[in-house]
Image (cartoon, coloured by chain):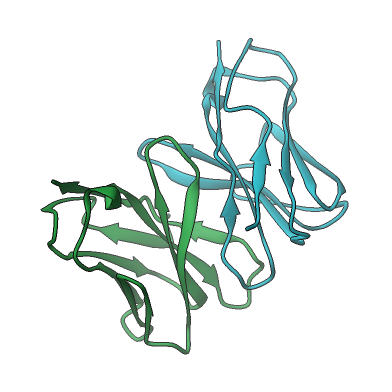
Amino acid sequence: SQQGEEDPQALSIQEGENATMNCSYKTSINNLQWYRQNSGRGLVHLILIRSNEREKHSGRLRVTLDTSKKSSSLLITASRAADTASYFCATALQGGSEKLVFGKGTKLTVNP
Amino acid sequence: DVKVTQSSRYLVKRTGEKVFLECVQDMDHENMFWYRQDPGLGLRLIYFSYDVKMKEKGDIPEGYSVSREKKERFSLILESASTNQTSMYLCASSLTRRGYTFGSGTRLTVV
């Protein structure tokens, strides 16, 4: 079964609006990461948040992590058409190796 | 910036052929990974390597093998290609406890 599950599966918003995507996971983690994938291409690393961190910012991105609820959220503020992509959360399991377990992604569409 | 290069963007092979997918990274990362991505199934780990000549099975290693003779190169081998191995193959590399850098992917079709 998937370690990380994104919600919603698909999201459609207008340019300028904020987009929020959520990720839930099952077991204890070392860190949680978010990636973006444009159609048919490789994934691009966006942000990494460690298990002892609660919030992290990078430009228009804000990630929160709640280890008690085993959940994370990715907020993209003032979205642009170029943000249209699939977004994946990935977890590095605590005590585990370097491998990441990916969720199935949220497909974000930003309409101009 | 770290670059991960996958040798082919698109590949068409026949059932039963031996297929080599090559991945090269240029920034001295110790960890390298092969995933496949299928609609509805997300990314699934096939194999990974944390050092030269070291490899570990991921979640779906059956029908695949890997080779890492040099630190910068991680090859995925389909011993006898089958139609259910038609997929997007993604290679990635990383430093320990850091984010991955992915290649652009190889879309393999087995006919």
- Residue A60 x, y percent position in the rendering: 30, 70
Where residue B7 sits in the image (x, y, percent)? 68, 31
Q: Nearer the viewer, residue A62 or B74?
A: A62
Nearer-the-camera pick, A35 or B65 = A35
Q: Colour of chain B?
A: cyan
B52 lies left or right of A41: right
Residue under the point 88% across and 48% down: B70
Q: Which chain is depicted green?
A: A
Decide which of A59, A42 is in the foreground and name it: A59
Q: For the point 31% across and 81% down, which residue is it?
A: A69
- Quarter of the image where one finds residue B13: top right
User: Which part of the image, by quadrant, shows the N terminus of chain A?
Assistant: bottom left
Tell whether A61 sits left or right of A89: left
Question: Is A50 above or below relative to B38?
Answer: below
> How many numbered tags mark residues here?
0
Percent of width and height locating residue A93: 55, 71
Residue A88, compared with residue B40, is above or below; it is below
Relative height, residue B4 to residue A63 (above, below):
above
Residue drawn at 37 percent across, 50 percent down: A104
Q: Is residue A17 left or right of residue B43?
A: left
At x 60%, y 70%, the residue is B98
Find residue A76 and report its horizontal and vertical position in percent.
26, 66
